[in-house]
Image (cartoon, helix red, strand yellow):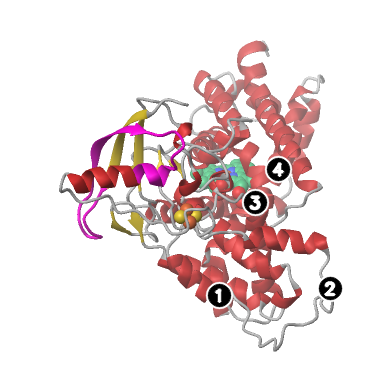
């Protein structure tokens, strides 16, 4: 059995969106290395509730690495130190007894803090609503083989579609740019036959909404790719640029 | 034409212009370096003088090229300043702690995060360079001085010599990230060519840094010309 951990946590506390926040320091004791990071925060909250204090607000849902709700900055890294891992799937064995852990919310103008570690990622939803879908009525499900899609095309489309929309790319980017997210959401359709009819409009609308939300500009630093819990590649950003150029210069759709 | 304006001011539109202006500047660097390296031809400066005279007798092409370069630099600089401001505005409240999650690796990574700083050094170098060679504000030569003699004389000035070595090495660092980054900005990535472009970027950075810095190093510090 591995030894239990005693840790010092520096947690961002902010009562509501307009309030001035600050870091508060807490000690947690006897943390099992088998716990997830969120379970460790549950332990902290149980302790705070026992003492009659406000528990730390943080977002979470599936706790199995598929919903993308649980993002937070852990020691300056989106979703913590382990690559290809969401916060809920991060284990406490990645930390050492006596460690101090700094926990902050995502920081971006387009992700305003609502409370403590919870941010409003509605900007991602609005980008998605601007064109991240296909609106053609396809009727009944077609026969599986009637729309041939080569595996070399289907695989990258699927890889792009695995984006959780967690916001780690924005959080980790020095410019708070959302281009990895938008790149993935544009790519997942641009690569498939079903996405072709609205291909140009989609790229233009989603980029326009991304700019409207005031995300930053990509400077090809690639910190987003390293922070992404599902490994979305920066190839998606190049594809986004290509799709945008194609749509604005070569298509007859007006931006 | 409203669509064109929208495209040009969009985030990706600006990235694309940054890529195009950066690559055009890289093209200028190649031509400029090619001419400058003629200083090393061991013929007492004949080749370089001929080249310089041929250039200066272009009564139409030279002013057009000069204006083109001014526009190109201004365009690149303006885009740099506006995107930099957008990026700062996109995160009004920063982190208490922020660490990279990239594998600590090749030197090309830090270069990407200091583009504004390296660009600013290059800009200062550019001002010094124009003041020296184009406008001769600091050191005047005698009437009818040959181009080779002028270059050799100006590079002996200690401020010029050291400033140029720093400026050109920093320029190399700027294009180390910039050259390959421009391709990504233009959407030109490819499983076969992107690795080659990254290597070409490295080679280009060495060529630019070492190529340009060799001139003040040789004429300012080593040669007795
Ligand atoms: C001969 C001089 C220069 C050359 C050859 C050059 C080249 C480049 C290239 C190729 C890029 C990459 C474009 C892209 O990522 O799409 C770039 C980006 C950039 N340059 Fe320059 N540049 C020069 C001078 C300057 C100057 C004077 C500044 C002024 C501050 C500057 C600031 C920047 C900035 C901020 C970026 C953006 C970085 C990014 O988006 O990643 N550059 N440059
Ligand atoms: S809570 Fe769903 S991914 Fe972490």
Using the rendered image, report if marks 4 and 3 lie on a common chain: no
Q: Secondary structure at mark 3?
A: loop
Q: Which residue is mark 4?
A: B56
Distance between mark 4 and mark 3 Cα atoms = 49 Å
Distance between mark 1 and mark 3 Cα atoms = 22 Å
In the rendered structure, the residue with mark 4 lies on which chain?
B
Distance between mark 4 and mark 1 Cα atoms = 50 Å
Instruction: Based on the picture, tell me whether residue A40 belongs to the magenta stretch.
Output: yes
- Quadrant of residue A60 within the rendered picture: bottom left
Q: Which residue is mark 1?
A: A205
Q: Which mark is residue A148?
A: 2
The stretch of residues the image draws in magenta is A13-41
Image coordinates for residue A55, horizontal then vertical, percent: 24, 50
- Quadrant of residue A102 within the rendered picture: top left
Regarding residue B63, the answer to whether it shows in the image is no
Q: Quadrant of ligand 1?
A: top right
Distance between mark 2 and mark 1 Cα atoms = 28 Å
Where B216 sits versus B130, above or below?
above
> In this rendering, which labeled residue sits more in front, label 4 or label 2?
2
Q: Which mark is residue A233?
A: 3
Instruction: Based on the picture, tell me whether residue B212 belongs to the magenta stretch.
Output: no
In the rendered structure, the residue with mark 2 lies on which chain?
A
Where A18 sits versus B139, above or below?
below
How many residues crowd mark 4 within 10 Å: few (<14), some (14–19), many (20+)? few
Q: Are marks 3 and 2 in contact (CB under 8 Å)?
A: no
Marked residue nearer the N-terminal end (1 or 3): 1
Using the rendered image, report if marks 4 and 2 lie on a common chain: no
How many residues crowd mark 2 within 10 Å: few (<14), some (14–19), many (20+)? few
Q: Are marks 4 and 2 in contact (CB under 8 Å)?
A: no
> In this rendering, which labeled residue sits more in front, label 2 or label 1?
2
Q: Nearer the viewer, residue A186 or B201?
A: A186
Q: Secondary structure at mark 1?
A: helix
């Amino acid at each position: 059995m591995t030894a239990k951990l005693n840790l010092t946590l520096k947690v961002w506390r902010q009562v509501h969106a307009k309030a001035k926040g600050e870091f508060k320091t807490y000690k947690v004791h006897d943390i099992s290395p088998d716990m997830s990071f969120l379970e460790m925060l549950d332990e902290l909250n149980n302790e705070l509730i026992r003492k009659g204090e406000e528990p730390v607000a943080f977002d979470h849902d599936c706790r199995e690495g598929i919903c993308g709700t649980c993002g937070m900055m852990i020691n300056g890294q989106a979703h913590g130190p382990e690559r290809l891992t969401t916060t809920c799937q991060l284990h406490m064995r990645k930390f050492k007894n006596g460690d101090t852990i700094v926990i902050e919310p995502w920081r971006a103008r387009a992700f305003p803090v609502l409370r403590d570690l919870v941010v409003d990622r509605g900007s991602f939803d609005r980008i998605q609503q601007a064109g991240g879908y296909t609106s053609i009525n396809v009727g009944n499900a077609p026969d599986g083989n009637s729309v041939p899609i080569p595996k070399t095309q289907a695989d990258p489309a699927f890889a792009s579609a695995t984006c959780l929309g967690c916001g780690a790319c924005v959080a980790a980017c020095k410019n708070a740019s959302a281009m990895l997210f938008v790149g993935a959401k544009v790519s997942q359709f641009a690569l498939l036959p079903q996405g072709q009819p609205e291909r140009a409009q989609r790229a233009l609308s989603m980029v326009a909404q991304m700019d409207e939300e005031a995300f930053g500009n990509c400077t090809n630093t690639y910190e987003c790719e390293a922070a992404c819990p599902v490994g979305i590649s920066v190839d998606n950003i190049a594809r986004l640029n290509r799709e945008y150029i194609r749509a604005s210069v070569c298509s007859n759709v007006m931006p | 034409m409203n669509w064109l304006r929208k495209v040009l001011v969009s985030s990706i539109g600006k990235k694309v212009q940054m890529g195009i202006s950066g690559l055009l500047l890289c093209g200028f660097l190649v031509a400029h370096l090619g001419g400058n390296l003629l200083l090393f031809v061991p013929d007492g400066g004949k080749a370089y003088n001929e080249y310089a005279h041929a250039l200066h007798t272009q009564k139409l092409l030279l002013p057009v090229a000069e204006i083109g370069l001014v526009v190109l630099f201004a365009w690149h600089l303006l885009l740099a300043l506006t995107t930099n401001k957008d990026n700062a505005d996109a995160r009004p409240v920063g982190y208490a702690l922020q660490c990279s999650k990239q594998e600590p690796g090749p030197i090309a990574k830090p270069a990407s995060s200091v583009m504004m700083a390296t660009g600013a050094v290059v800009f200062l170098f550019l001002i010094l360079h124009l003041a020296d060679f184009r406008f001769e504000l600091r050191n005047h030569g005698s009437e009818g001085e040959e181009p080779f003699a002028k270059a050799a004389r100006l590079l002996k000035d200690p401020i010029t010599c050291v400033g140029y070595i720093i400026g050109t090495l920093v320029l190399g660092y700027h294009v180390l990230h910039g050259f390959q980054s421009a391709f990504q900005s233009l959407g030109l990535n490819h499983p076969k060519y992107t690795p080659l472009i990254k290597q070409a970027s490295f080679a280009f950075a060495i060529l630019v840094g070492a190529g340009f810095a060799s001139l003040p190093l040789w004429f300012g510090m080593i040669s007795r010309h």
